[in-house]
Image (tube, rainbow, N blue to C red):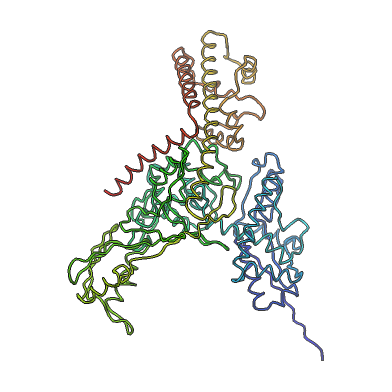
Amino acid sequence: SGWLVVSFHLCDLICFDQDGSHIKGLIINFVHCNWPNLLKHNVVEEFITPIVKVFKGKQEYSFYSLPEFEEWQKSTPNWHTWRVKYYKGLGTSTSKEAKEYFSDMNRHRIRFRYSGTEDDGSIQLAFDKSKIADRKNWLTNFTQERKRRRELGLPEPYLYGKDTRAITYHDFVHKELVLFSNLDNERSIPSVVDGLKPGQRKVLFTCLKRNLIREIKVAQLAGSVAELSAYHHGEQSLMSTIIGLAQNFVGSNNLNLLQPIGQFGTRLSGGKDAASPRYIFTALNSLTRLIFHLEDDPLLNYLYDDNQRIEPEWYAPIIPMVLVNGADGIGTGYATHILNYNVIEIINNLYRMLDGEEPHRMLPNFRGFTGTIEDLGNNRYVCYGEVAVLDDDTLEITELPIRVWTQNYKESVLEPMLNGSEKVPACITDYKEYHTDVTVRFVVKMSPEKLREAESNGLHKFFKLQTVMSTGSMVCFDPLGCLKCYPNEMVIIREFYELRLTWYEKRKVYLEGVLSAEARKLENQARFVLEKIQSIMVIENKPKKELIRMLKEANYDSDPVKAWKESIDKAAAVQEQEEARAEEGVPQTEAVEAGQPDYNYILNMPLWSLTKERKDDLLAQRDSKQKELLILKSKSPSDLWREDLKKLEEEYKVFSYLIIL
C-alpha cells in the first residue's frame, strides 16, 4: 500500500496587455479567496507573450511590458525608423510566432512564487471591497512616483526582464496590475485640461486631422479613428463614444463637439434610443475649432503608438470643457461626477480673471433645462422640475429633474400612481402625454381631494419632481497626469486659467518664430527670383548637389520654417513633412539627407515663378508677414485670449439661438 499523490498546476495563457493583467489578477484573486493555501504551494504559472515587437531589416526585438519598450525608445537614437507592432491580443501572433514561443518554454513560462504574508496583503489591496481607501492611496502614490521619475528622466520599473523566471504576487500587484488599475482610471476619468477621456480624445483628434466639415457615417468615422489614432479596442464602444460627443438633448452636452445628423437619441430615453451607427451621420461642430484652436496644435505633446503619431496627451481648449459638458466615470478606487455649467458664465469668469478680478461662483446649468436648481450648501444642489395646477382636478408637468428621462418617469412614477399596489392605493385617475423629442408634457387627472393633499405636501415632492445633485466627487487627472479631487468648480477654473495663460505665452512665442521664419523664406525666394532674372544665379544643366553648394555659398537660408518647427518638435516636424510629401506625390528620393541644408523650397519653385511679377508678389507677402509679426508683438498673451473668447462668445450665442429654433 502507499499514498497516491496528485499534483497540478494552473497556467494561464491570455492577452499580455493591461487588460490581460486584470484577467490574471482576477484568476489569482479567485484562487486566493477559495483555496488560499494553494498559492503557498506555487501552483500558479503564466505563459507570457510579447506586447510589442520592433523590426528593422533582419533585427527583431520583443518587449513584454510597455515600460520596457518605452525605456528602449529613450535609449535608441532614431527609434522611429524601426517598424513597431503592438500585439493587442493572442490573435495578433501568427502560427509561426506561436511555434517560436512554445519552442522556448524557459523564456515564456513564468512561475508565481509565494513569498509570505505581504503577498496576501497585496492581493487584498487590489481586490478587497474594504480596502477602497488603501487602493486610492496606492494609485495616487503610483501616479506621483511615475511623475517624479519622468521629471528626473528615470526609467519606469517593469516586471519581466530577460532573465525573469519567477515573480512574487507582491511584485505582480505593484508592478503589473497597478498599470491596469491606472489605465482603468485613465479610460474612465477625464483630464481637467480638456475634459476628455482617451477614447473621446482619439475621436476629436481624427476629426480635426481630417478637418471633418463634411458629414460622414458614424460607422465609417469609427474605422477612421481606429486607423489614425491606433484605437485597439471594440468598435461598438468607439461608436457609442462618437454618438455621445454629438448628443445635444437636455441633460447631455451643453456644447456638443460633433453634429448630430440623424437620430442620436433624445431625452425620452436618455440617448438609448439612438439609431444604428450605420444609419446616422456626423461632422465637426463649427464651434469646435474655435475652442480647440488650430494655432495651439503644434505646441501639444503628441503620443506615439505603433511608431505612429496619434492624439496628444491632452488638448488645450480656450475654456475648461470639463465644466461645460461635465463628466461621469467609475475607475479603480476612484469615481468622478462633474455637473455641467453655463458656457457664457464660464467665459465671463475668464474675462474677470484676465482683468485681475475674482471669479464668481456658478450654479450647475444645463442648456434647454426650464426647471430650477438651488444651492443647498456643502457642494449639494436640489434640482426641481416644473409642475402647475390647471384646475380643480388637473395639473400639468412640463419639466423633469435633470437626467430623469421621460419614459423612465412614466414607468416608475406615474404608472404606479395610476394603478396603485397592495400597499399603496392609486392617487391619480388618468394621465395623457403630449411630448416632443425635446420637451416634456404630462397632463395628469386626479380627484380634487387628492390634488389638495398633494399641494399641502408639496407638488414637487408628491410627484417626485426633485432630485439632489452633489459635486463632492470632482475627480480629474491634473495637467501632470496625477489623480486629483477638486473641491469645487472655482478650483478647476483657477487651475485651468493659470495653465491656459501659460499656453498663450507659448503660442505667442511660437507664432512670432513662425511669422519671422515665413518672412525670411519669402525674402529668400524673392532674392532667388531676382538673381535668376539678372543672371547672377545660373541653374540650368547643373546637378542638384552643385545647386545646393551654390545656394549655400550665396548665404541662402536653409528652409527657415522647417528649421523653426524642428526646433520645437523634431519628430512632429519630420512626420508633417512626410505626410506633405505623400499628399503632393513627391518621391522619397527628394527627401533631404540628415544634417544637410534644405533648399527644396527654392529649387521646387515652378518655372512661371521666375518672373518680375512673382518677385514683387513674394516681397509683398513678406511685407504682409512682417506687418502681421509687428501686430502680434504688440499684443499680450491676455489680449490673444480675449480675442478668442470674444469670437467664441459671439458664435456660441448664434449657435444657441439656432438650437432654440
| Residue 583 or residue 246, whichever sits in front | 246
Image-quadrant location for residue 151: top right
Vertical position of residue 337 compared to residue 660: above or below: below
Q: Nearer the viewer, residue 392 or 138?
A: 392
Left or right: 308 with respect to 493? right
- Whole-percent x, y for residue 22 in the image: 61, 64
Q: Vertical placement of 299 versus 427: above or below?
A: above
Q: Position of residue 543 (x, y in %)?
A: 62, 19
Q: Position of residue 594 (x, y in %)?
A: 66, 30
Quarter where residue 308 is shown: top right
Q: Quadrant of the N terminus?
A: bottom right
414 sits to left or right of 562:
left
Q: Is residue 148 left or right of residue 351?
A: right
Q: Nearer the viewer, residue 401 or 267?
A: 401
Q: Is residue 47 above or below residue 649?
A: below
Image position, residue 7 (x, y; %): 74, 78
- Judge whether 532 appears above or below 649 on screen: above
At horizontal 43% and vertical 37% (from top left) the residue drawn is 644
Furthest residue in direction right, as rendered: 1
Q: Residue at x 59, y 45 (%)?
A: 304
Closer to the camera, 214 or 21?
Answer: 21
- How many discs mark residues in the rendered view? 0
Outermost residue toward the left in this view = 391
